[in-house]
């Protein structure tokens, strides 16, 4: 298993598939058993840091894309990894869940102040702690004027709440749904 340098990434990918759709409909005992099997494989790895890096990237994708199958299963997996890796290693990953909860609260407050739509756009933003989330190089992007209006509105709202913090917009992590007047199906 340790002869292949890709094994840690493959195990993290398998874990991602399990946590996205593989555990659907499974009992608590079966979930525990399957997650324990993944952790047992993790214990045998020489490239644990590669697994953690890949696991973190997949978790970020699940959180941002809202493809979590079960919050409880995610927390259970974190607890199992904390036992093997230690609390310090897993604190950053735990902070990702905290960021998502805080973002949900910020979005609710923003919606109360600004309304559900700005310039005809249903807008939402996730505020992520720098250094906690895996980052890729952010490609440059130019956004349309209505989106700039949404961005400026959210930035003003956020600066009003958190005076000394700076927002950096990562467009490559975002999603957009475009509706057209000539079809009923959104894209």
Image (cartoon, rainbow, N blue to C red):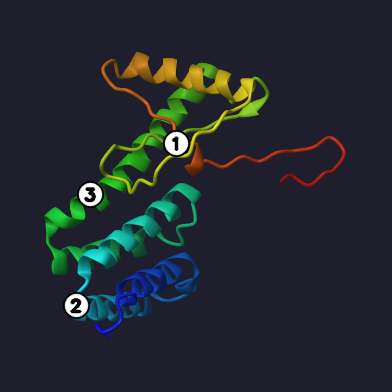
Of the two numbered discs 3 and 1 on the same chain, state the one appearing first in sequence. Answer: 3
What residue lies at 15% left-to-right and 69% top-to-bottom? 84
Observer-nearest residue: 84 or 28?
Answer: 84
Estimate how packed mark 2 is, as few (under 14), some (14 to 19) or many (20 or more) residues with alpha carbons within 10 Å.
some
Q: Which residue is mark 2?
A: 43
Q: Which residue is mark 1?
A: 170
Report the side of 75 relative to 147 (left or right). left
Estimate how packed mark 3 is, as few (under 14), some (14 to 19) or many (20 or more) residues with alpha carbons within 10 Å.
some
What residue lies at 19% left-to-right and 51% top-to-bottom? 91
Residue at the extreme right: 182
Q: Which residue is mark 3?
A: 92
Tell me whether circle 3 and circle 1 mark residues in contact (CB < 8 Å): no
Q: Quadrant of the N terminus?
A: bottom left
Report the side of 179 relative to 61 (left or right). right
Report the side of 111 relative to 156 (left or right). right
Write down the quadrant of residue 105 in the picture.
top left
Q: Is residue 165 above or below residue 102?
A: above
């Amino acid at each position: 298993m340790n002869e292949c340098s890709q094994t840690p990434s493959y195990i993290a990918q398998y874990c991602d598939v399990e946590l996205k759709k593989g555990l659907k409909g499974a009992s608590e005992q079966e979930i525990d058993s399957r997650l324990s099997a993944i952790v047992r494989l993790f214990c045998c790895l020489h490239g644990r840091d590669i697994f953690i890096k890949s696991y973190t990237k997949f978790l970020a994708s699940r959180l941002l894309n809202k493809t979590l199958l079960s919050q409880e299963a995610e927390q259970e997996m974190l607890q199992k990894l904390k036992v093997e890796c230690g609390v310090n290693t897993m604190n950053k990953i735990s902070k990702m869940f905290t960021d998502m909860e805080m973002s949900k609260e910020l979005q609710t407050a923003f919606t109360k102040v600004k309304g559900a739509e700005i310039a005809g756009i249903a807008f939402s933003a996730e505020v992520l702690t720098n250094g906690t989330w895996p980052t890729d190089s952010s490609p440059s992007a130019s956004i349309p004027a209505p989106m700039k209006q949404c961005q400026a509105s959210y930035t003003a709202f956020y600066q009003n709440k958190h005076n000394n913090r700076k927002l950096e917009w990562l467009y490559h992590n975002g999603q957009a749904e475009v509706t057209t007047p000539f079809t009923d199906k959104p894209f």
